[in-house]
Image (spheres, coloured by chain):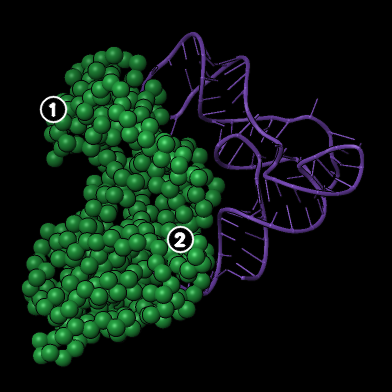
Chain colours: A green, B purple
RNA sequence: CGGGGAGUGGCGCAGCCUGGUAGCGCAUCUGCUUUGGGAGCAGAGGGUCGCAGGUUCGAAUCCUGUCUCCCCGACCA
């Protein structure tokens, strides 16, 4: 049996390694390009159509393994994790509680809500060895309601917002655009449980704020737009759209939405329901709607300030009342002793989709231009003369100092020509390039280039470090 | 699911119509020269042409089946 061989291998690995290793190597991933796995290509792969997909393949972020299914290579994985971390921090800040539910679910759960038959062929259905019907979860409303409902015995345990960040699968008829419309995708989905509609609105506003902050931190202008609630049902719903020419849908909005908000502008406390309501109402006062939800009257009102664009959906929040709590039989005794069916909302962010969406919104002719907040490394350290001892020593020294200062650095120490290294650095789009060359070393300076603007300056190594660390 | 297209060294492609020693560019390896924006020259390695049948003296090429992938449409985070 395969597991016997496997356990034998495990046993071998369990033996202590001979000889010692420097502790830093054990605890830190290699960030020297000569030991990294970054398969970049000069030519554009034939099967990618849009810029972000082409660039993600060329820059060695992903590889497709089946239609709509991607492996995340080291650099892509780091971007994914950066985004995930921001999402998590803002969920936590909003008062949501993280958990983790499985990818595989039982059909029985979905029969309770009636969605097993309703969902259609987008659901990947599988059978286990006992011929039990299972599925690879496309979402988790049923599961969270079953779990949370089974252990919640009083109104005193409400409200709650629970979330997890987990892989989902939807068997799209036609996957395309790389990770932006894959079949397997990483998603943050949160579920709120409240005693009444007023409470549910507060939960909704908490998530609205968390979403605005999440996208603001990524440097994205993500616009909350009135949206259809889709097959999931409900009446209060916003899609978060970022603008990009290749977006999947047409959107209409007031020009005030064009400037990205900063997280500082969104510093209201999520716990004060009425203050938050007022704040969110103010923020969302300007018109913004997807194609299906256009409002001619408000567009006339916006007048000259009305803008239209293509957009990519990166998040969706909606309140849908008692649809699942009712179907799954969740009830708790309320303050007056009467049974109450909790009000729910659910809130998704397409984490893996965001990687593509950000790149779609931020690239140029030379490659990806990553926002600082989600860059896999902050600095590309480039020694343009690997054979020059003085350059190598200067670059090695900078590498050590950057790491010591806690700056995430990818050190291009490969035996390549300068041009190839510049091209790679531009392609992968790290925010800063720190360039060490013989001319500069001669004069005791290094060159610092900002990827987004192309702006370069010569600085002493000390000043360059300070600039990059700040 | 309907319509269209493609599978040929790691990547991008030609060859197929008209069957006869499998080619080009990039990448890789070796040597020399080069070294601030994907270097030059010389040499080398690497492909049972997606897979399975069939036709034929002979199949990348023709026929049948099958798998995989791409594009357009309807659908979706």
Chain assignment, label 1: A
Is the residue A46 above or below the residue A19 in the image? below
Q: Where in the figure is residue A132, as x and y percent of width and height? A: 48, 68
Quadrant of residue A136 within the rendered picture = bottom left
Cα distance between the residues tagged 2 and 1: 47 Å
Q: Where in the figure is residue A338, as x and y percent of width and height? A: 16, 91
Can residue A324 be seen in this snapshot? Answer: yes
Is the residue A464 above or below the residue A144 in the image? above
Residue at (35, 42) in percent of width and height: A75
Chain assignment, label 2: A
Quadrant of residue A335 within the rendered picture = bottom left
* Nearer to the camera, A66 or A238: A66
Q: Which mark is residue A85?
A: none
The local crowd at label 1, few if under 14, some if 14 to 19, many if 20 or more residues have their Cα within 10 Å, is few
Residue under pointer 2? A183
Comes first in the chain, label 2 or label 1: 2
Q: Where in the figure is residue A74, as x and y percent of width and height? A: 36, 41
- Same chain for the residues at labels 2 and 1, yes or no? yes
Q: Which mark is residue A462?
A: 1
């Amino acid at each position: 049996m395969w597991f016997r061989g496997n356990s034998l291998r495990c046993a071998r690995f369990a033996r202590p390694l001979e000889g010692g290793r420097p502790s830093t190597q054990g605890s830190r991933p290699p960030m020297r390009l000569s030991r990294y796995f970054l398969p970049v290509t000069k030519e554009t792969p034939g099967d990618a159509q849009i810029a972000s997909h082409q660039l993600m393949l060329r820059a060695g972020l992903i590889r497709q393994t089946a239609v709509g299914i991607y492996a995340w290579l080291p650099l892509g994985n780091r971007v994914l994790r950066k985004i995930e971390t921001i999402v998590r921090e803002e969920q936590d800040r909003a008062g949501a509680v993280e958990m983790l539910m499985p990818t595989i679910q039982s059909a029985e759960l979905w029969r309770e809500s009636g969605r097993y038959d309703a969902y259609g062929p987008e659901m990947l259905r599988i059978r286990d060895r006992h011929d039990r019907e299972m599925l690879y979860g496309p979402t988790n409303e049923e599961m969270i309601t079953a779990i949370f409902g089974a252990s919640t015995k009083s109104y005193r345990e409400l409200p709650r917002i629970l979330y997890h960040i987990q892989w989902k699968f939807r068997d799209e008829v036609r996957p395309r655009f790389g990770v932006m419309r894959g079949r397997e995708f990483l998603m943050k989905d949160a579920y709120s449980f409240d005693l009444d509609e007023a409470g549910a609105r507060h939960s909704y506003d908490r998530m609205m704020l968390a979403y605005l902050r999440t996208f603001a931190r990524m440097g994205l202008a993500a616009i909350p737009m009135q949206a259809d609630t889709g097959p999931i049902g409900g009446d209060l719903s916003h899609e978060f759209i970022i603008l990009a020419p290749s977006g999947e849908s047409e959107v209409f909005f007031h020009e005030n939405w064009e400037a990205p908000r900063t997280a500082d502008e969104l510093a209201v406390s999520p716990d004060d329901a009425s203050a938050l309501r007022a704040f969110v109402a103010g923020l969302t006062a300007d018109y913004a709607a997807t194609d299906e939800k256009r409002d001619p009257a408000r567009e006339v009102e916006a007048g000259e300030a009305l803008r239209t664009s293509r957009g990519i959906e990166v998040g969706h929040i909606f309140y849908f009342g008692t649809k699942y709590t009712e179907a799954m039989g969740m009830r708790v005794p309320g303050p007056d002793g009467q049974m109450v069916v909790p009000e729910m909302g659910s809130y998704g962010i397409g984490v893996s989709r965001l990687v593509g969406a950000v790149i779609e919104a931020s690239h140029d002719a030379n490659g990806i231009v990553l926002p600082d907040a989600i860059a896999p490394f902050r600095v590309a350290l480039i020694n343009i003369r690997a054979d020059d001892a003085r350059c190598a020593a200067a670059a090695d020294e900078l590498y050590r100092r950057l790491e010591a200062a806690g700056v995430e650095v990818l050190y291009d120490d490969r035996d390549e020509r300068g041009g190839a290294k510049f091209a790679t650095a531009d392609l992968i789009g790290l925010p800063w390039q720190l360039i060490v060359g013989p001319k500069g070393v001669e004069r005791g300076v290094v060159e610092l280039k900002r990827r987004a603007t192309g702006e370069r300056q010569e600085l002493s190594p000390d000043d360059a470090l300070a600039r990059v660390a700040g």
